[in-house]
Image: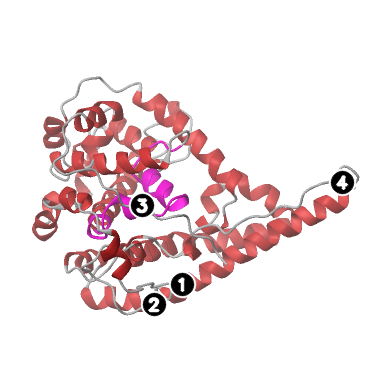
Amino acid sequence: MISYTAKYLPSTMSIATRPQLRSTYRSLVLLSRVQPSSTSAAAAPAKAHDGGGTGGGEHKVPDPEFVNAPLSTLPAALELPHKGPGDSTFPHLIKTGKAYLGFYKTGLKNVYKNFIATRPIQSRIDKKGSITDLVEAGEITRREFQLVMRNRHDSRRIPIFGLVFMVFGEFSPFVLPFISGVVPINCRIPRQIQGDRIKLEERRAASFQNLPKGRNLSELAQEKGSVRNLTSNEVLHCSTVLGLHSGKWPSALYPFLPPTMWLRFKLWRRLVYLDLDDILLARGGGPVMLDSGEELKMAAVDRGFNTLQKTETRLREELKLWLKAKETAGGKTLALWLTRPTEWRNSFSSSPPTTPPPTLQHPTPRKQQ
C-alpha cells in the first residue's frame, strides 16, 4: 500500500516532466555514441576547471576535462609503511598511524579546497535560480556539477567527522572505517571503500531475488513513473539497490525504521541527481570519457551497478546500456531498478548497434600530486 505521506512529495524532477530536459534527452543515447576522433580530441584546448572557473556550459569537442570531477574530490593515495622481518611492532604502528593521519589531513585540505572552488559555480547557480536551470541552459559541465555535489556531500560531514577526531585522537583511523556515513568521500581509505561495496552488493543481490521475473520495462515505466507511485516495499528495494540507507536496520522494523517517507525523499533526490548527471555525461561524450579507476566506479555505483569483479570495459558498456534503457523508459529511472539488471541489459545488448564500435582509447587514471 502506498504511504499516505507520499502524496506530499514534490513530483519527481525526471526528464519526462521537464520539457526542455526532455528534448535534450531525446538525443542522449546518440550523444553517448558519438566519439571524437583522435585528431579532434588532441586539438581540443586544455579546459581544466580545478579552481571552479567562471565558464562551463556545453562544448563542441568532447573532452575528459569536461566530464571528470577534480582529483581533489577523490581519496588521495594512501601509502602505508612496510613492516620488515626485524622491525618492532610498536614503531611500525606509530608509522602506520602517522600515514593515516597524513591521509586524513590531505582529505580535509581537499574538502576546503573544493569549497573554495565551488564559490564561482554557486554564484552562477544562484543567479540562474537552480542547478537544474543551469543544466537546461547548457551553462555547466559535468566536472563542475560533480564538484558542487561532492562538495555538498563532504561539507555536511565535516562537523561529525571533526568530532570523532576530537574524541578518539590518534585512534580515529581505527574507528572511522566502521562509520562510513560520517566520512567525506575523499577521506575514505581503499579498504573502507572496498568493504562498503562488498556489503552493498550482497544486500543488492538479496533484494533483487525478491523481484518478479520478466517485467516489461516500458509498461513498468508508465506504471511506476514517480516515487509517489511506489509501494513501501518497492521504495525499500530501490533504496537498498542504491545504498541510501544502512543495512543495520532490522527488516522487521520497516516501514517504521527507517521511515518510508524519509526513504522516498532520498530516492527522489537521487533521481534528480541522476537525471542531470546523465545529460551532462552524454554532453561530455558519454561513458567512454570517464577516467579509468574510481571516477568510473563511482558513476556505476551511483546508478546501482555492481563493480566488483568487473572490468572497466564492461562497466563502460553497462553505462551505455543504462542510457539506452533509460531512453526506452522515457527517462523514468525507477523502472530500471524495479527490473532485474540482467534482463534489461541482455535485451538491449542483443540489439545491433546503429554505429560502429568506437576505437577511442579510454582516459587513464589520474593521480594526485
Q: Is residue 316 visible?
A: yes
- Residue 213 location, x and y as percent? 24, 19
Marker disc for residue 119: 2
Q: Is disc 4 placed on a helix, strand or loop? A: helix
Q: Is residue 1 visible?
A: no
Asked if the residues shown at circle 3 and circle 2 are in contact, with their CB atoms under 8 angstroms apart, the answer is no
Asked if the residues shown at circle 2 and circle 1 are in contact, with their CB atoms under 8 angstroms apart, the answer is yes
Comparing 307 with 175, the one in front is 307
Marker disc for residue 115: 1
Asked if the residues shown at circle 4 and circle 2 are in contact, with their CB atoms under 8 angstroms apart, the answer is no
Earlier sequence position, callout 4 versus callout 2: 4
Q: Is disc 2 placed on a helix, strand or loop? A: helix
Asked if the residues shown at circle 4 and circle 3 are in contact, with their CB atoms under 8 angstroms apart, the answer is no
Q: Amino acid at mark 2?
A: Arg
Q: Is disc 3 placed on a helix, strand or loop? A: loop
**Dot 1, crowdedness within 10 Å: few (<14), some or many (≥20)?**
some
Magenta segment includes 285: yes
